Image: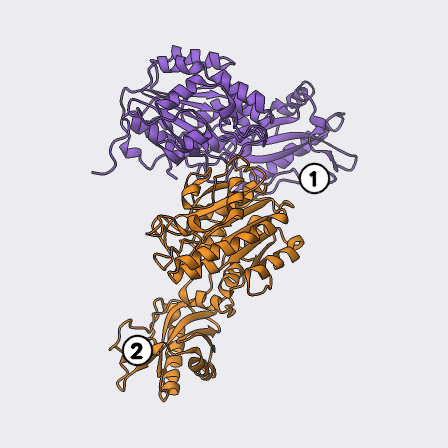
Chain colours: A purple, B orange
Amino acid sequence: MIDVEELRDCYTNTPSKMVLLVADGLGGLAHPDTGKSELETAHTPNLDALAQESACGLTTPVLPGVAPGSGPGHLALFGYDPLKHQIGRGALEALGIEVELAPGDVAARGNFCTVDENGLLVDRRAGRIPSAESAPICERLDRIEIPGVQVDVFAVQDYRFVLRLRGEGLSEAVTETDPQVTGAKALPVTAIRPEAQKTADLVNQFVEKAAQLMSEEERANMLLLRGFAQMPSLPPMGDVYRMDPAAIAAYPMYRGLATVAGMKVIRTGRTFADEVETLKENWDNHDFFFIHYKPADAAGEDGNFDAKVKCLEDLDPFIPAIRELGPDVLMVAGDHATPAIMAAHSWHPVPFMLNSKLTKGQGVPTFDEKACALGALGSIPATSVMVMGMSHAGKLNKFGP
Amino acid sequence: MIDVEELRDCYTNTPSKMVLLVADGLGGLAHPDTGKSELETAHTPNLDALAQESACGLTTPVLPGVAPGSGPGHLALFGYDPLKHQIGRGALEALGIEVELAPGDVAARGNFCTVDENGLLVDRRAGRIPSAESAPICERLDRIEIPGVQVDVFAVQDYRFVLRLRGEGLSEAVTETDPQVTGAKALPVTAIRPEAQKTADLVNQFVEKAAQLMSEEERANMLLLRGFAQMPSLPPMGDVYRMDPAAIAAYPMYRGLATVAGMKVIRTGRTFADEVETLKENWDNHDFFFIHYKPADAAGEDGNFDAKVKCLEDLDPFIPAIRELGPDVLMVAGDHATPAIMAAHSWHPVPFMLNSKLTKGQGVPTFDEKACALGALGSIPATSVMVMGMSHAGKLNKFGP
């Protein structure tokens, strides 16, 4: 699997324009009644027409058999080896609500929970307390002051929040407080490496103050902290690929991932129609666009086969509008499969197509798992997607003399 | 190519059960008269029926173009990068006759040979002296005593034996005594690294005593030693995969390889029918079973196409009995191809199928090289087999948040 910097010297700047459309959770599995996957079931004439003029294949997100989270799934499509560049849970949670994580900041994912009079865990998620009740608690926790560090608490949703520590000499190398079982006490944080002792002490002070402050709350009288993480430092896509990349995504998580990869995030609306409009408006300002389509993944995660089919059909009519812009390279990819029959991310190879003036005659009849398996590209690691795009766009010089 | 520990944190223990059936030397090549491979020629209705409900593909044992020995072929299927975890010739020879190699022990593969009155090699294999004649020589050599080390000699077959050294501070980093040509003298052993000087001295003492002791033997009056090796220390499969793995194999070599990988070896009989019976009897005691079918490889190595076809047909009727046990994941794999027309192990990708409740609709019509090449899994490294099995068994969590 290639990593983003390996061909660094071969990339060249040209005026050609690339679009990477990521349909989240694109791939699927056959419905037991019909033997057809979501893509095979969906009526998608525009995607199929594009597939007939594209080089098609399947992408393996991380490694065969490995189902990725959203972080590794996207980083791989951007060209980063997802085993090498890992984003911790706390950092990803911060990305998901667009909380800025500066270099050195440490973020943790927090859960509100309930404990009994002896401090033993009763409910690790505080009965999934709604946002309306958890937000005020976050505001009170946000006012906690610990000498030597800036502490901020951000509500996420329901029982979830983000804790961010900002200060000198912090480290992500600390253990979690969540014992993962009820009937046990929350654990104190300990340093995994010596340089993390200061962070461990600060977190334990925060938890102590938070526990006092929450002790009278009815619905959520304690908190648990997991996934302490700093933001990884990635070589920016613009530098490596000698491009000016931009991201258009309605969901904050994906804007965050684009930021980590060094893309400029363009403000857009809440729907994919808004995203395509944003793409049109900014067409002259960038030479690479990552545009994200979320609904298919959400439907797959819900285990709703028909809804996922509908989401794919809803994406289809936007394809002509993107093609009309005349991208030199248009790629349609997925960060991973989300088969509705699994109601989860999966490891299955994901349909992929790349359209350029160099892909005529390489097409397959339809855009789905089975047809793409027989496509000209065969099966490639997702980290090769950017390399393929760059070469088809004339932005990747010959390797070696 | 993934190595066994890379996803260590993602494995999880579940009650689901996996079976990895390894048909040794499974893959083949077309017979020149018919254009059909051994698998294509064989009548294997049960394997074909399984393929129709399985995700199928081809596995590359080590790297494209590389024919593996039994050691790397199996280690890769167990998830170990065979380039990283190598078993030396002496250690593999010891495994093949179930000679225990404790940590620190050094083993070498020995050949009996003949030398003339000047000590020059006449026959490097002593006319392939039969076991009946070589075994008594082994017994005499086994009684040699060298101060500071325990020396044991084990007969293998014909002119081959294993020398085992057991003691403090031994090293495998010594040269071989076999000059590889006749007309030359056996070489003294020298240390490749300084810490191996003691071992080199001990081996040279042993060779000197052995030469004296054998000088009057008619058929084999000298010995050659090759492939000094210690047993590699592998992360045990049970620890990495959080399973309780067991091995069922009629041949000692494969029991030895399973032991190196940390599996519990279950006693069984001499036939595959015995092995399947053992599998049934122990079904409740483990969650992972490696079961080994040897005959196809032996027939391939003999260059006997029809015999290999027959061996594959003989395997076929056992498939229903294994399926009746209800494994959550059943995988049929080969450690390498042994095309009868080559009469040797080969580098060709090997048919593979994985059956689970998630593989419906992914099947191919028949279980052979051509059909599997068009299967849903495509072409994967053999080291991905365990990852695929684990994910389909629900034992591999999502990678990354």
Residue A289: image x %, image y %?
Answer: 39, 20
User: Going by the image, does B312 lie left or right of A211?
Assistant: left
Residue sticking out furthest to the front: B33
Residue A166: image x %, image y %?
Answer: 53, 29
Check the residue under mark 1 and report the chain it is in: A
| Near-viewer residue (B13 or B273) | B273
- Residue B123 marker: 2
Residue A307 showing in the rendered view: yes
Q: Are marks 2 and 1 on the same chain?
A: no
Count of labels in the image = 2
Marks 2, 1: nearer the viewer: 2
Tag 1 residue: A181
User: Which residue type carries mark 1?
Assistant: Val
- Say which residue appears at 37% left-offset and 87% top-offset: B217
| Near-viewer residue (A239 or A77) | A77
Q: Is residue B146 above or below residue A192?
A: below
Q: If the image is split into quadrants, where does the C terminus of chain B sit?
A: top right
Q: Secondary structure at mark 1?
A: loop
User: Going by the image, does B175 lie left or right of A348?
Assistant: left
Q: Label 2 vs label 1: CA separation?
A: 70 Å
Instruction: Find residue A125 and report its image quarter.
Output: top right
Instruction: Find residue A129 and report its image quarter.
Output: top right
Residue sticking out furthest to the bottom: B216
Residue B269: image x %, image y %?
Answer: 58, 65
- Say which residue appears at 39% left-offset and 87% top-offset: B213
- Say which residue appears at 54% left-offset and 38% top-offset: B359
For label 2, the crowd category at 10 Å Cα-Cα, with few meaning under 14, some 14 to 19 and many 20 or more, is some
- Say which residue appears at 36% left-offset and 66% top-offset: B193
